[in-house]
Image (cartoon, rainbow, N blue to C red):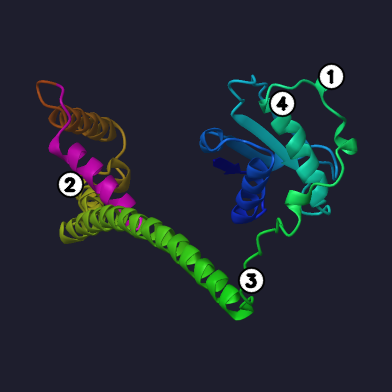
Amino acid sequence: MILENHTQYRRNDLQAFFLAGLKALGESSQDIDRKRIIVKYSRSRGAVTGLATLGKPDRHGSWIQMNLPGPSYPLDLQEVARVFRHELDHNFGLEHADMMPVNELGHQAWAEGLSIRLLEEPAKPARDIQRERYDHAKWMLDYHRGELAKLEAIRQRKLGVVRRWNEKVEYYEQVFAERKAACKANPDNNNSETDQGQSSKVEGHDCASTGETGDAAEECAAGENDIVSEEAIIDEDETGEPEDADIADESMSECGAMSEA
């Protein structure tokens, strides 16, 4: 006999119960060997039901399904025995018209002394609250350590970026310092322009200061105009390019901006 147990009832009890029924109700040893009995929970509350293949007198059916009540309902072994006899009669080839109703089958003596017990639930271990709290604290610690490692990686990347930009800033500050030092090392061209203005006043002839009048005053003014014309010609070369003094003025203006900064 092959038993398939899909319930919480003990397998040994079920096998002993149905094997006793097969022998008591006249099943041959050959048919017992090939019999397959499936045990499941019943869909009807507290009811015992069954299914079976319809056999023939010369070849009995080999399959029976017994549906037993769930663990929360009481199990009537006499009811199980009557339903099992009914399904076995189907294996013998009988139909409902040939059989008595299940509730009229009466007492089944072969089921006396047998039992079908539920499996004992394993004892639950005592709950260790401290261990549970420790495990939770350990998990939280590992999690936040991982988060901190991520933040530290971001910090290291940002430090690298700050270091590179700091090097650029220091480089340009050094360049500006060197330029400022170069400007301080060269004389200021503004002083040269002042000297030129003073020298022109010394070399120039102020006709008004001599107190000359008449023809002498006219000759003095004409001579003064000639001197101005010659100076204008000298200040510009043949190509019309500005003199080096003009370039020096631009350089000194840049140095002046550096000194102001």
Q: Are marks 2 and 1 in contact (CB under 8 Å)?
A: no
Front disc: 3 or 1: 1
Look at 22% across and 44% down and name the residue there: 251
Residue 4: give x, y in percent of width and height.
Answer: 58, 41
Query: In the picture, which quadrant includes the C terminus?
Result: bottom left
What is the C-alpha distance between the residues marked 4 and 1?
Answer: 11 Å
N-term mark: 2 or 1: 1
Q: Amino acid at mark 3?
A: Ala
Q: Amino acid at mark 4?
A: His
Q: Secondary structure at mark 3?
A: loop
Residue 8: give x, y in percent of width and height.
Answer: 67, 53
The residue range painted magenta reads: 240-261
Look at 37% across and 56% down and name the residue there: 158
**On screen, 30 above or below 120?**
above
Drawn side of residue 229 relative to residue 37, left or right = left
Q: How many neighbours does mark 3 have within 10 angstroms: few (below 14), some (14-19), or many (20 or more)?
A: few
Q: Which mark is residue 90?
A: 4
What is the C-alpha distance between the residues marked 2 and 3?
Answer: 125 Å
What residue is shown with label 3? 123
Q: Which mark is residue 203?
A: 2
What count of labels does the image hold?
4
Is 38 within the magenta? no
**On screen, 63 above or below 144?**
above
Q: Are marks 4 and 1 in contact (CB under 8 Å)?
A: no
N-term mark: 4 or 1: 4
What is the C-alpha distance between the residues marked 2 and 1?
Answer: 155 Å
Which of 53 and 203 lies nearest the eye of the viewer?
53
Residue 85: give x, y in percent of width and height.
Answer: 75, 37
What is the C-alpha distance between the residues marked 3 and 1?
Answer: 50 Å
